[in-house]
Image (cartoon, rainbow, N blue to C red):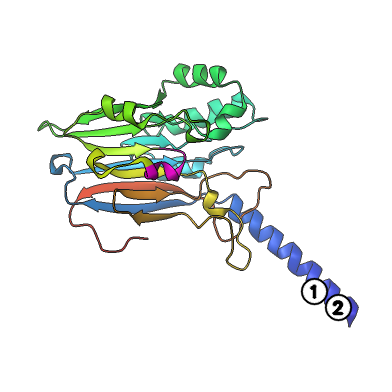
């Protein structure tokens, strides 16, 4: 009886481990429509492919083929790489993302584990726009403006939101990319930042009995902005996930009344 019980525990453990590996290497694109009453209607809709926390993974062709032709721009939300990842893999991932559309990047804490000057040179060589406390402006045919802002790594006090705001058009619809979701603590209502795209937490990565230091990735309506926290595409330390599967996002922004609750 004891032998059978031990065997069942071992088999259960192996099955759980295989399930956690599967969750860590999923190629899931989460499609989300987000409505804002002040989104500039002359843009029609704007589609953003958002991916964060790639770390050691190579982006699957499944992801690229799923999104290609559907997104207007790509935003990398930090932790493109980490210590020990060959630059050749980083270049492969950047070339893959460029098939989707113009690519914008913000720094994450793990990106600074390598020679960041070398990474900066790779990004420049691949035509990737780095949003390091800067912004980029898009304009509709009728002259309405949308600004994508990005801040540098908050963990190392490199973030300068005020500089990114100075670089943005004052009367624009503002979206902020930050590796850290707690950048929202620095956002004031008068900044008029409507959406924040972030990662870093991996959605807790592993939840045992529903518990983890971080909550699962989600979309939250805050008083000062709307915040997207992604579970992220890769993992740190062990390549395992439980309760927070790997994900990236195809976000569609539209003009319209915002729902009372979002998930």
What span is colored magenta in the figure? 178-185
**Does residue 201 sit above or below 159 in this rendering?**
below
Relative depth, front residue between 263 and 167: 167
Secondary structure, mark 2, is helix
Is residue 140 visible in this depiction of the protein? yes
Q: How many marks?
A: 2
How many angstroms separate mark 1 from mark 2 (CA)? 6 Å
Q: Quadrant of residue 165?
A: top left
Q: Residue at x 60, y 24 (%)?
A: 87
Report which residue position mark 2 lands on: 4
Tags 1 and 2 touching, CB below 8 Å: yes
Residue 71 position in % (x across, y down): 33, 40
The answer to if 180 sits in the magenta stretch is yes
Q: Which residue occupies 18% across, 57% down?
A: 257
Q: Is residue 136 left or right of residue 37?
A: right
In the orientation shown, which residue stands out farthest toward the bottom?
1
**Quarter occupied by the N terminus:** bottom right
Residue 8, labelled with which disc? 1
């Amino acid at each position: 009886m004891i032998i059978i019980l031990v065997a069942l525990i071992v088999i259960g453990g192996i099955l759980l481990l295989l399930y956690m590996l599967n969750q860590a290497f999923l190629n899931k694109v989460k499609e989300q429509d987000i409505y804002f009453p002040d989104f500039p209607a002359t843009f029609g809709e704007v589609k953003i492919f958002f991916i964060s926390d790639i770390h050691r993974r190579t982006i699957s062709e499944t992801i690229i083929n799923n999104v290609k032709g559907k997104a207007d721009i790509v935003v990398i939300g930090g932790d493109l790489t980490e210590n020990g990842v060959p630059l050749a893999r980083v270049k492969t991932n950047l070339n893959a993302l460029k098939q989707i559309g113009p690519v914008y990047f913000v720094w994450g804490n793990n990106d600074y584990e390598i020679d960041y000057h070398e990474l900066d040179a790779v990004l420049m060589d691949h035509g990737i726009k780095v949003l390091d406390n800067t912004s980029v402006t898009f304009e509709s045919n009728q002259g309405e403006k949308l600004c994508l802002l990005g801040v540098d790594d908050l963990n190392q006090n490199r973030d300068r939101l005020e500089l990114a705001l100075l670089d943005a058009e004052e009367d624009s619809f503002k979206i902020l990319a930050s590796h850290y979701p707690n950048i929202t603590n620095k956002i004031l209502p008068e900044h008029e930042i409507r959406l924040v795209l972030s990662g870093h937490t991996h959605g807790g990565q592993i939840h045992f009995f529903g518990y983890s230091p971080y909550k699962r990735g989600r979309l939250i309506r805050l008083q000062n902005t709307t915040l997207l926290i992604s579970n992220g595409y890769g993992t740190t330390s062990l390549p395992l996930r439980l309760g927070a599967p790997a994900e990236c996002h195809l976000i569609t922004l539209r003009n319209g009344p915002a729902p009372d609750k979002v998930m």
